[in-house]
Amino acid sequence: MRTWILYGIWLGGLLSALSWFANLWASVPSTVSVFPDLITFIALPVLVFLVLRLFANRHEGLTRATLRRAGMVIVSVGATLFAVSIAVLGIVRFSQPSAFILLIGFIMAFVSFLLVGWLSVWVASIWLTHAEGK
């Protein structure tokens, strides 16, 4: 379980950094976007697949249910870190941010990360266990 949490921190931190850099390079200075470009949006499913593949290769004999459980924990931890980083980005980017705007940004980041991440976990678990015949 501790390894799953560490993978989630790694995933959330990497996508947070991608989102921060893309938001800072944006031409409009007083906006914050959860997924500011297509690369950031596509990076989430790709990274989820790579993390689950790494996890499946390290632990032989995993069932689809175990792989999905690990993926759900990884994505949930990553979503929490990502949502907090988007809220902090709102504090940095806006001169006087309101708590409501920061809350909306947090919720949008958290929910979108969870939905895309959980769908990615579901697809990746089918691919990884089907390829190994489990």
Image: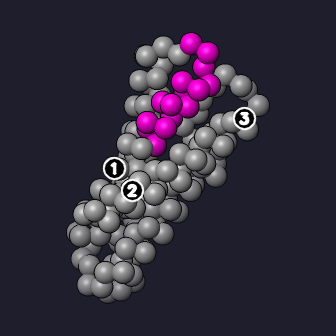
Mark 1 vs mark 3, CA separation in Å? 28 Å
Which residue is at a point 41% across and 24% down the rendered structure image?
103
Pointers 1 and 2 in contact (C-beta within 8 Å):
yes
Coordinates of residue 62 in the picture (x, y in percent): 26, 79
Judge the density around disc 1: few (<14), some (14-19), many (≥20) Cα neighbours within 10 Å.
many
Asked if the magenta segment contains residue 88, the reply would be yes
| Nearer-N-terminus badge (2/3) | 2
Which residue type carries mark 3?
Answer: Ala
Image quarter (top left, top right, bottom left or bottom right) of the C terminus:
bottom left
Query: Relative to residue 133, is residue 102 drawn left or right?
Result: right
Residue 119 seen in the current view:
no
Where is mark 2, residue-wise?
A: 8
Q: Which residues are magenta?
A: 82-96
Q: Where is the N terminus found, in terms of image quarters?
A: bottom left
Q: Quadrant of residue 5?
A: bottom left
> Within the image, what quadrant is residue 125 found in?
bottom left
**86 drawn magenta:** yes
User: Residue lying farthest right?
Assistant: 27
**Res 84 quadrant in image:** top left
Compared with 113, 49 (above or below) is: below
Q: Amino acid at mark 2?
A: Gly
